[in-house]
């Protein structure tokens, strides 16, 4: 049984585009097993972000069906964590409080956040230590380097123990050394906790290093489909 299940999924962003047959993604069929790490590569405009929005329930398909964890997707999913190219930490919050944010706003944590803040903070500290940010809990984002902010944003994406982690070009802005260090950290976290990962990247080497399966999303005339699967052994 697959954890992520797209069956013939199409999306037009609005009614006019739909009427004109202009779909941002077309006929996506994709099955991903629980705990798998997949990467999606492809040129700008081929539909990668659209795919992410569909996978998290931020957009509903115009046609087709999407199920995540055996449940039809009907709205924004709380079981997913996200990180993007810009770490987008809140500047007035410390590293620790940035990482805690999802627990403050997502049920079932939200209702017990005040009462259990100590326990949650301990969880956040442990996660920060794993990514090499032990000792930086009380710093503000502007006191951290770009790489450190990105580490914190990955912790924030994982703090509510999501079953699915969505990463959109998360390492794109980092230098090559920091990037490779974060690859290893991400792989360790994934090996330990086995959440599903969907990584969107322009870096083929990154996709091959990290993912079980790499999908190339292509842009044929007006068509955007998850087209080809590269099966490459991991290093
Ligand atoms: P990628 O992430 O691969 O660059 P996108 O998913 O952003 O691709 O875009 C896929 C297609 O959908 C593009 O043709 C883009 O112009 C179009 N598109 C993306 N977002 C919107 C939107 N909000 N409204 C209308 N069209 C959009
Ligand atoms: P970058 O994103 O600039 O490549 P990294 O996140 O890889 O940097 O950080 C490299 C190391 O440099 C960190 O582990 C940390 O020890 C140190 N460092 C970078 N910026 C700062 C800072 N603002 N304050 C303290 N130490 C820093």
Image (cartoon, grey):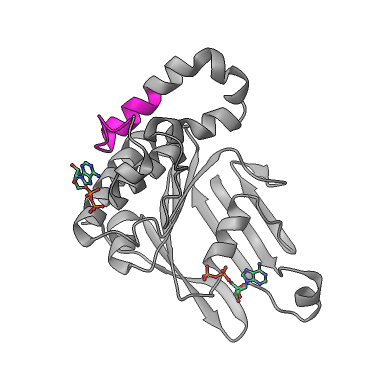
Q: Position of residue 210 (x, y in %)?
A: 31, 54
Answer above or below: position of 153 versus 14: above
Q: Please report the bounds of the magenta region as a residue range.
A: 123-137
Numbered circles on residues, count? 0
Q: Position of residue 125 (x, y in %)?
A: 34, 26
- Left or right: where does residue 195 sit relative to residue 113? left
In the image, residue 79 lies in the stretch drawn in magenta: no
In the image, residue 124 lies in the stretch drawn in magenta: yes
Residue shown at the point (74%, 64%) measured from the top left: 63
Q: Which residue is nearer to you in this view: 225 or 150?
A: 150
Answer above or below: position of 170 versus 138: below
Residue shown at the point (30%, 64%) measured from the top left: 232
Q: Position of residue 65 (x, y in %)?
A: 70, 56
Answer above or below: position of 115 versus 147: above
Name the image quarter holding the N terminus: top right
Residue 221 in which image quadrant = bottom right
Residue shown at the point (39%, 30%) measured from the top left: 96
- Left or right: where does residue 205 sit relative to residue 34? left
Name the image quarter holding the C terminus: bottom left
Residue 85 in which image quadrant = bottom left
Residue shown at the point (42%, 48%) measured from the top left: 36
Quarter of the picture for ligand 1? bottom right
Q: Position of residue 83 (x, y in %)?
A: 45, 49
Residue 169 in which image quadrant = bottom left
Q: In the image as oriented, which residue stretches furthest toward the top?
A: 115
């Amino acid at each position: 049984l697959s954890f992520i299940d797209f069956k013939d999924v199409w999306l037009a962003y609005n009614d006019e585009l739909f009427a004109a047959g202009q779909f941002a993604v077309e006929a996506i069929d994709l099955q991903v097993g629980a705990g798998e790490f997949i990467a999606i590569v492809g040129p700008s405009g081929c539909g990668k972000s659209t795919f992410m929005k569909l996978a998290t329930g931020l957009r509903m398909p115009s046609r087709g069906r999407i199920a995540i964890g055996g449940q039809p997707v009907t709205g924004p999913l709380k079981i997913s964590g996200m990180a993007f190219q810009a770490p987008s930490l809140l500047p007035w919050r410390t590293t620790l409080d940035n990482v805690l944010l999802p627990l403050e706003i997502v049920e079932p944590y939200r209702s017990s956040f005040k009462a259990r803040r100590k326990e949650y903070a301990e969880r956040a500290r442990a996660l920060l230590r794993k990514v090499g940010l032990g000792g930086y809990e009380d710093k503000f984002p502007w006191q951290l380097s770009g790489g450190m902010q990105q580490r914190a944003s990955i912790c924030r994406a994982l703090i509510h123990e999501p079953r699915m982690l969505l990463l959109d070009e998360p390492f794109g802005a980092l230098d090559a050394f920091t990037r490779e260090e974060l690859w290893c950290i991400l792989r360790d976290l994934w090996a330990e906790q086995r959440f599903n990962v969907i990584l969107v990247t322009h870096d083929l080497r990154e996709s091959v290093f990290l993912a079980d399966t790499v999908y190339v999303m292509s842009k044929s005339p007006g068509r955007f489909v998850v087209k080809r699967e590269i099966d490459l052994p991991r290093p």
